[in-house]
Image (cartoon, rainbow, N blue to C red):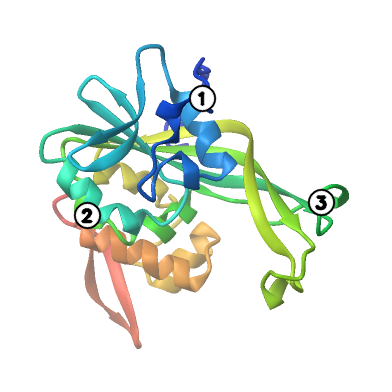
């Protein structure tokens, strides 16, 4: 599905502790978790420049006129930066989508592992709409490519009493890349139609979309909002109080 292919990675041979790699303006390496740094290093090729300032922004990797940015969360925070960079540069935005997660809990001093378990939650490509809902206006920018990496990660926590009450005071201190299992590249918004399941009725409601994609209702609403914002679906009526959507007639 979705043209997914296994990825062969090229490891960069750059010292992460060199002065050049320590540039930071709130986006650079000093504020990275391991997941961001590991993906960046795996993407890097010989000749790439890391942590370079372009148009006032620190860029993860510069490869000629191509700017490669790794964003592990909050794509909405990239709106202003992307809009500026896309005026004069090709940009590849790399987003890791977590498929499987292992949780390692350390003691308060982070010296000993107390336990390690696999999260029961399985990720899926449609989870991407949790982020795309914030940038639908950028998806058809001709200079933008979005690379979605399906990853397995280890989340490192510390039983230090400083974390959320939902985790009983356990803090999240890091995320580490274990493997990249698949990749999906979005060149333009129409590629997103591949995520509409063939069994989805036409027209459909958000509830029917949630059932067909195994998403929560709130996620299905984000998906339909995004697809509508880029003109791939349109509202065609109502069923009771629920909006009805279908593929746009131009598709």
Q: Reading the chain from its start, which is encountered first: label 3 or label 2?
A: 2
Is 69 above or below relative to 173?
Answer: above
Please tell me how crowded label 1 is: few (under 14), some (14-19), or many (20+) other residues with Cα within 10 Å. Answer: some
Query: Is residue 243 shown above or below 180?
Result: below
Residue 81 in the image: state x and y as whole percent: 24, 49
Residue 161 can be seen in this image: yes
Query: What is the C-alpha distance between the residues marked 3 and 1?
Result: 26 Å
Farthest residue to the top: give it: 46
Task: Name above or below for residue 222 compared with residue 154.
Answer: below
Residue 232 shows up from this direction = no
Q: Position of residue 238 (x, y in %)?
A: 28, 81
Question: Which residue lies under the disc numbered 3?
Answer: 117
Q: Secondary structure at mark 1?
A: helix
Q: Are marks 3 and 1 in contact (CB under 8 Å)?
A: no
User: Marks 3 and 1: which is nearer the front?
Assistant: 1
Report which quarter residue 61 is drawn in: top left
Q: Secondary structure at mark 3?
A: strand
Residue closest to the eye, 101 or 205: 101
- Examine the rendered structure and indicate whether residue 72 appears above or below residue 16: below
Q: Residue at x 50, y 58 (%)?
A: 213
Q: Are marks 2 and 1 in contact (CB under 8 Å)?
A: no
* Marker count (numbered): 3
Could you say where residue 142 lies in the image, as x and y percent from the top left?
16, 37
Q: Earlier in the sequence, mark 2 or mark 1?
A: 1
Which label's residue is closer to the chain start, 3 or 1? 1
Disc 2 secondary structure class: helix
Between 147 and 194, the one lying in front of the other is 147
Name the residue that disc number 2 marks: 80
Residue drawn at x 20%, y 24% is: 65
Q: Which mark is residue 42?
A: 1
Q: Residues within 10 Å of mark 2 (few under 14, many from 20)?
A: few
């Amino acid at each position: 599905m979705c043209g997914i292919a296994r990825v062969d990675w090229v490891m960069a041979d750059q010292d992460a502790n060199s002065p050049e790699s320590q540039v930071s303006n709130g986006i650079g390496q000093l504020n990275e978790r391991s997941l961001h740094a590991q993906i960046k290093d795996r993407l890097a090729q010989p000749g790439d420049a890391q942590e370079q300032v372009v148009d006032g922004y620190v860029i993860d990797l510069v490869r000629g006129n191509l700017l490669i940015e790794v964003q592990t969360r909050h794509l909405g925070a990239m709106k202003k930066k992307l809009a500026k960079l896309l005026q004069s540069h090709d940009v590849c935005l790399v987003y890791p989508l977590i498929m499987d997660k292992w949780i390692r809990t350390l003691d308060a001093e982070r010296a000993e592992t107390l336990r390690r378990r696999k999260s029961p939650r399985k990720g899926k490509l449609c989870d991407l709409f949790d982020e795309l809902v914030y940038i639908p206006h950028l998806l058809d920018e001709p200079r933008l490519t979005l690379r979605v990496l399906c990853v397995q990660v280890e989340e490192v926590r510390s039983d230090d009493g400083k974390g959320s009450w939902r985790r009983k005071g356990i803090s999240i201190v890091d995320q580490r890349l274990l493997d990249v299992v698949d990749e999906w590249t979005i060149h333009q918004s129409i590629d997103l139609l591949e995520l509409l399941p063939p069994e989805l009725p036409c027209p459909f409601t958000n509830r029917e979309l949630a059932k067909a994609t195994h998403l929560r209702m709130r996620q299905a609403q984000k998906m339909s909002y995004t697809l509508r914002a880029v003109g791939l679906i349109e509202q065609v009526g109502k069923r009771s109080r629920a909006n009805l959507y279908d593929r746009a007639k131009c598709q």
